[in-house]
C-alpha cells in the first residue's frame, strides 16, 4: 500500500500540547510540508514566539530559537544577516506580533529583511488566558473585555497584512485561513510562495493565517471554525496584498 | 482503494475531520483513548474517495492515508 498522505519529515512525532481542535497544529504541518517540498529543512532555522506556540521547537525537525516576546523578527534579522544561506522563519501569534512586537515586524518588513513570517491571528492572547489582542474583533468578549471590545475606548482591530502592504519596500504579504478545506489548501499555496521568495533571495514575506482558539473563545472546535468564517473573514479579507513584482 | 488509518491515541477528539469529510464516513466513537478523548473512526471505508481532506484538517497528525490502486486527485496541494 502506497501512502498518499503522511506526516511530513520536517515534523517530529511528538504529540503537541495544543488544545483539541486548535489550528496551530494544521499550520505547523503546512510549514513542515513546504520545508520538505522545497528541500529547505537542512538550512532552516525557526524562531518561536512567546504565546501558545512557544514550544514549537519540540515539533519541527530543524534548528530553532526561542525569542523574547515579540522580538522574533529581530532574532531572524540577525540570523539572516550573519548567514544569508540560512532559511529563516518566525512563527508568531497576534499578541506577540501585533502587540508587543508591532514595532519589530514593521521595521523588519520595512528594511526588507529576507526571512519569512508565519503570523497566526486567532483574535486573542491564547496562552495567558484569552485577553484582548490588537486583533480582537469589535464586540468580541474576552477576559479583559467582558462586555465586548469597545472601539471607542480601544480602537479597531489592526489589519496587519494591509498595514505592512502599505510599505514601499518590496515584499510578499498574504492572508489566508485554515478554518475549512479550501482555506487549508490556499494557505499551503501562499506559504510555498512565501518560502520560495526567500529561497530565491527576493524579499521579506509574511503569511497571516486566521486560526482558531476554541478554548479561549469558549466554543467547541467545529463552532470555532465556523466563527472564523462568519466573523473573522469579513473583517480580515483573504488574499494577496502585496507581491514583489508589483511595486506601488 | 484508499484506506484511512486513524492513530487513535494521537486523536484529541476535536471532530474537525468529521466536519471536513465530504463523504460523511467519519464519526466519533463512544470509547476513550489513552488521553481520555472520544476518538474518531471510519465507519464506511468503501465509500472513501481518498480526497485526504480529513488528514489535511486534522491538527494532530492522527490520520494517515494509504491507497493500493489509482486514486483520483481532486485538487493540487
Ligand atoms: C515581556 C512579556 N510580556 C508579557 C508576557 C505575557 N504573555 C505571554 S504569552 C502572551 C500573549 C500571547 O498571545 P498570542 O501571541 O496571540 O499567541 P497565542 O497564545 O494566542 O498563540 C503574553 C502577553 C510575556 N511572556 N513577556
Ligand atoms: S489556548 Fe487557544 S491558541 Fe492556545 S493551544 Fe489552546 S486553543 Fe490553541
Ligand atoms: S479521505 Fe476524504 S472521503 Fe476518505 S475519509 Fe478522508 S475526508 Fe472522507
Ligand atoms: S481531526 Fe484529528 S484529532 Fe480531531 S477528531 Fe479527527 S482524528 Fe481526532
Image: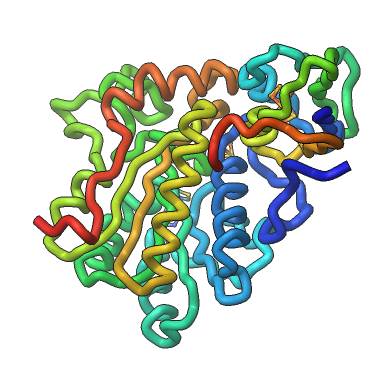
Asked whether, in this view, residue A167 is left or right of residue A243, the answer is: left
Quarter of the image with the C terminus of chain A is: bottom left
The x and y percentages for residue B60 are 70, 39
Q: Quadrant of ligand 2?
A: top right
Quarter of the image with the N terminus of chain A is: top right
Front-most of A46 and B70? B70
Q: From this viewpoint, is residue A239 visible?
A: yes
Which residue does the image show at 62% across and 75% down from the upper left? A42
The x and y percentages for residue A165 are 19, 51
Which residue does the image show at 49% across and 56% down from the upper left? A50
Residue B17 lies in what quarter of the image?
Answer: top right
Pick out the residue farthest to the left: A248
Which residue does the image show at 47% across and 56% down from the upper left? A91
Pick out the residue farthest to the front: B70
The x and y percentages for residue A191 are 45, 52
Compared to residue A59, the image places residue A189 above or below, namely above
Compared to residue B70, the image places residue A204 above or below, namely below
Asked whether, in this view, residue A3 is left or right of residue A17, the answer is: right
Asked whether, in this view, residue A222 is left or right of residue A7, the answer is: left
The x and y percentages for residue A148 are 31, 20
Amino acid at each position: 500500500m502506497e501512502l498518499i498522505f503522511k506526516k511530513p519529515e520536517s515534523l517530529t512525532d511528538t504529540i503537541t500540547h495544543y488544545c483539541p481542535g486548535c489550528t496551530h497544529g494544521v499550520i505547523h504541518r503546512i510549514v513542515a510540508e513546504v520545508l520538505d517540498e522545497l528541500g529547505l529543512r537542512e538550512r532552516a532555522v525557526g524562531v518561536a514566539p512567546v504565546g501558545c506556540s512557544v514550544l514549537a521547537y519540540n515539533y519541527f525537525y530543524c534548528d530553532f530559537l526561542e525569542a523574547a516576546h515579540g522580538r522574533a523578527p529581530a532574532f531572524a534579522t540577525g540570523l539572516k544577516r550573519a548567514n544569508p544561506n540560512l532559511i529563516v522563519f518566525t512563527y508568531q501569534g497576534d499578541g506577540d506580533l501585533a502587540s508587543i512586537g508591532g514595532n519589530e515586524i514593521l521595521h523588519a518588513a520595512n528594511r526588507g529583511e529576507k526571512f519569512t513570517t508565519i503570523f497566526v491571528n486567532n483574535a486573542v492572547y491564547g496562552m495567558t488566558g484569552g485577553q484582548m489582542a490588537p486583533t480582537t474583533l469589535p464586540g468580541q468578549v474576552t477576559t479583559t473585555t467582558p462586555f465586548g471590545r469597545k472601539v471607542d475606548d480601544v480602537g479597531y482591530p489592526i489589519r496587519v497584512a494591509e498595514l505592512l502592504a502599505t510599505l514601499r519596500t518590496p515584499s510578499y504579504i498574504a492572508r489566508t485561513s485554515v478554518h475549512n478545506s479550501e482555506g487549508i489548501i490556499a494557505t499551503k499555496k501562499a506559504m510555498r510562495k512565501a518560502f520560495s521568495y526567500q529561497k530565491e533571495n527576493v524579499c521579506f514575506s509574511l503569511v497571516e493565517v486566521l486560526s482558531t482558539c476554541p478554548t479561549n473563545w469558549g466554543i467547541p472546535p467545529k463552532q470555532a471554525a465556523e466563527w472564523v468564517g462568519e466573523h473573522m473573514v469579513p473583517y480580515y479579507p483573504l488574499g494577496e496584498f502585496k507581491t514583489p513584482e508589483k511595486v506601488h | 482503494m484508499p484506506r484511512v488509518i486513524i492513530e487513535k491515541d494521537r486523536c484529541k477528539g476535536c471532530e474537525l475531520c468529521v466536519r471536513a469529510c465530504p463523504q460523511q464516513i467519519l464519526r466519533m466513537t463512544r470509547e476513550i483513548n489513552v488521553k481520555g478523548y472520544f476518538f474518531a473512526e471510519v465507519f464506511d471505508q468503501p465509500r472513501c474517495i481518498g480526497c485526504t481532506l480529513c488528514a489535511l484538517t486534522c491538527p494532530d497528525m492522527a490520520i494517515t492515508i494509504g491507497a493500493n490502486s489509482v486514486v483520483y486527485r481532486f485538487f493540487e496541494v
